[in-house]
């Protein structure tokens, strides 16, 4: 017996022989799982003097990027049935005049690669991330350039999940500046061209298939986008401030229509790149970008303006600061009263996490900034009319200028927009810029305001810009910032790439990878009153084990009692349902809602005015017309829903 036990223990010990070192672990991952190991690529060398005993000798140091091959990531993804099923899912039916995603844009219909709906649509993203305290002694030392990509064939609600954003390259920011960003982009360009021309052979269900695809867009903030395109990065001091057109500072402040500017195009750009040393100042071009070599990719059409940076971190804070200062100067409201409204407002559970920070005099004078995050600024902009409506004259031209910007904001963040609405959007943007110059003649139109002019054309080409914004990509940075607390800083770029790929390998082992994640709160039995109300409306298959729950999280949205959801339309105005109860039966859910009709839009508040219809119905969470729950507030003795996005 003792001998048997000893032999058994020895066999257990041998179980882990193949995992006794990091090298053996990664070898095991490659052989048994879909582990895509980062590839170390040399992008340059530097020579420096180092101490060698009593002498100083020259030493060559290699600099690397850590690259995850595009074809290997795609092959790993096609091993997952949940991923393949998502690629086969289709859009909700809609008319040809409505733009909801890339498939509805002109580029999808005219592009040689994207005419085939099965070909992959790739979106590339780039940004710099500071891992250490930006005010500390190591600031900049461990700053990394992170390159991600996602696939537009995945439906938008799943595309916004962080596991559907994939790492493609990591490099030190200082190396990118020293050796040029093209050294990092070159292997990406080669992989993209291979994907579009030869394709990638993937294997699943004991069959092989060649998958092709192409690059749809590069999304980034202005600095990163200009860096990739080879344009002047510091637009504040550049003569040409726009990547979409040839726009001078003088023209930017006097012309408010896109057709008044000469748009950039590939043919002219290639000619300008031939003589950069002579024309750089007048054209705003620093170098010829390697992205020009990507098959069937237009670097100007394919770099849409980002709504987070243009609106939430540009136009809105710039305009709100001037609006608040205007009304403070008129002495109709004080800064203390504004802060009191911000502090004491009865925020809903939806808006509470992004409650705006209090303002100071420094924020409103000179070149001060409001110091709000992008999500805080969005909340402040939507709720500011509720804060101020009892103090300010809603017919003041300054307030009307702000109203127009809010309407533009709501339109741009819509996930569905008609071509007619795009035409109206062009006029609204031009009108708003005229208003701004009339209301604030001593203030300049900043580049981010000018960029608004090019967004309507981008929507027609690529679909709604909100489908390309950087907010979710920047959320991906959180993974690396958390790792920074335990990272090995000897080579932090490699550490981050390897850890991310191991985490990605683990995610691919999950059966529900990229599937609909549903969570709910505590459950309780259905009250007799509620049971009597819904018994004749609920399907017989769901009556068994019917329970109530306090909250439901589905596709990243949290629904609770008393929040509003869109359950229908009436004459192009939304019909809302106020959630009375959340019902659970087995693994399915229903909302018991009180229906509210929209009486109209109160433009001075930029809000829907709603009124109860005193009728109740069941709503399936999977079938509600707009996925985000809505906040309702009381203003001017009415129930109002501040408009976040236009609903149809």
Image: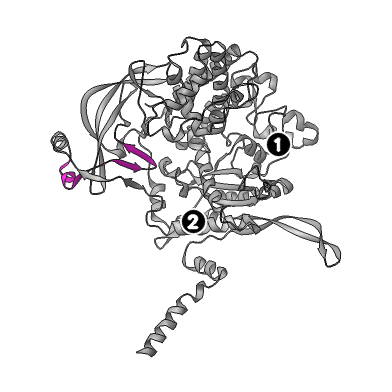
User: Which residue is more in the foreground, 619 or 195?
Assistant: 619
x, y percentage for residue 546? 19, 44
Residue under the point 48% across and 41% down: 115
User: Which residue is more in the foreground, 606 or 6?
Assistant: 6
Residue 346 sits above or below residue 54 on the image: above
Determine the image quadrant of residue 627. Answer: top left
Say which mark, if any, is on residue 504. 2
Say which mark, if any, is on residue 270. 1
Bounds of the magenta segment: 538-562
Residue 282 sits above or below residue 36 on the image: above
Q: Mark 2 vs mark 1: which is more N-terminal?
A: 1
x, y percentage for residue 431? 54, 15
Is any part of residue 68 visible from this angle? no
User: Which residue is more in the foreground, 185 or 107?
Assistant: 185
x, y percentage for residue 411? 46, 25
Count residues near mark 2 (Cα–Cα under 10 Å), then give few for <14, some for 14-19, many for 20+.
Answer: many
Residue under the point 46% across and 25% down: 342
Position of the N terminus by quadrant: bottom left
Q: CA distance from mark 2 to mark 1?
A: 39 Å
Q: Secondary structure at mark 1?
A: helix
């Amino acid at each position: 017996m003792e001998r048997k036990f000893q032999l058994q223990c020895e066999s257990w010990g041998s179980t882990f022989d193949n995992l006794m070192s990091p090298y053996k672990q990664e070898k095991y991952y490659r052989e048994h799982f879909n582990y895509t190991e980062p590839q170390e690529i040399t992008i340059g060398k530097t020579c420096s003097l180092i101490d060698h005993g009593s002498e100083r000798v020259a030493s060559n140091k290699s600099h690397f990027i850590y690259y995850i091959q595009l074809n290997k990531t795609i092959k790993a993804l096609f091993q997952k049935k949940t991923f393949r099923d998502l690629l086969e899912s289709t859009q909700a039916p809609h008319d040809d005049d409505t733009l909801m995603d890339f498939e509805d844009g002109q580029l999808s219909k005219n592009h040689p690669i994207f005419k085939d709906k099965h070909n992959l649509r790739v979106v590339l993203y780039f940004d710099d991330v500071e891992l250490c305290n930006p005010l500390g002694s190591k600031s900049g030392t461990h700053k990394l350039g992170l390159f991600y990509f996602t696939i537009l064939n995945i439906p938008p609600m799943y595309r916004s999940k962080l596991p559907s954003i994939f790492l493609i390259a990591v490099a030190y920011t200082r190396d990118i500046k020293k050796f040029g960003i093209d050294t990092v982009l070159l292997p990406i360009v080669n992989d993209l061209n291979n994907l579009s021309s030869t394709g990638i052979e993937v294997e699943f269900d004991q069959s092989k298939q060649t998958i092709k695809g192409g690059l749809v867009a590069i999304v980034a903030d202005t600095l990163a986008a200009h860096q990739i395109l080879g344009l002047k990065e510091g637009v504040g001091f550049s003569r040409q401030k726009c990547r979409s057109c040839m726009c001078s500072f003088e023209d930017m402040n006097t012309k408010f229509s896109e057709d008044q500017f000469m748009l950039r195009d590939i043919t002219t750009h290639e000619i300008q790149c031939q003589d950069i040393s002579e024309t750089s100042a007048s054209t705003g071009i620093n170098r010829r970008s390697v992205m020009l070599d990507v098959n069937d990719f237009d670097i100007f059409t394919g770099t849409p303006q980002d709504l987070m940076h243009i609106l939430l971190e540009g136009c809105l804070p710039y305009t709100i600061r001037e609006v608040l200062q205007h009304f403070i100067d008129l002495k109709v409201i004080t800064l203390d009263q504004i802060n009191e409204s911000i502090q004491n407002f009865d925020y809903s559970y939806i808006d509470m996490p992004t409650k705006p920070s209090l303002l100071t005099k420094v924020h409103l004078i000179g070149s001060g900034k409001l110091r709000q995050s992008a999500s805080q600024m969005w909340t402040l902009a939507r709720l500011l009319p509720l804060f101020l409506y009892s103090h300010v004259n809603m017919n003041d031209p300054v307030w009307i200028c702000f109203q127009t910007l809010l309407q533009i904001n709501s339109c741009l963040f819509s996930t569905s927009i008609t071509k007619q609405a795009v035409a109206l959007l062009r006029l609204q943007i031009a009108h708003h810029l005229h208003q701004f110059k009339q209301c604030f003649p001593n203030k300049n139109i900043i580049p981010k305001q000018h960029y608004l002019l090019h967004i309507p054309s981008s929507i027609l080409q690529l679909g709604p810009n909100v489908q390309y914004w950087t907010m979710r990509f920047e959320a991906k940075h959180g993974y690396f910032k958390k790792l920074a607390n335990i990272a090995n800083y000897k080579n932090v770029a490699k550490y981050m790439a390897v850890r991310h790929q191991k985490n990605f390998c683990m995610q691919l082992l999950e059966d529900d990878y990229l599937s609909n994640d549903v969570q709910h709160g505590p459950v309780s039995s259905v009250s007799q009153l509620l049971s009597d109300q819904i018994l004749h409306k609920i399907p017989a298959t769901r009556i068994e084990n019917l329970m109530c729950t306090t909250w439901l999280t589905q596709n990243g949205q949290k629904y609770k009692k008393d929040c509003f959801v869109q359950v229908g339309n009436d004459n192009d105005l939304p019909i809302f349902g106020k959630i009375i109860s959340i019902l659970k039966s087995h693994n399915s859910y229903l909302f018991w809602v009180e229906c509210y009709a929209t009486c109209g839009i109160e433009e001075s508040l930029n809000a829907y005015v709603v009124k109860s219809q005193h009728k109740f119905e069941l709503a399936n969470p999977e079938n509600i017309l707009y996925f985000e729950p809505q906040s309702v507030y009381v203003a001017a003795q009415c129930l109002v829903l501040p408009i976040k996005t236009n609903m149809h």
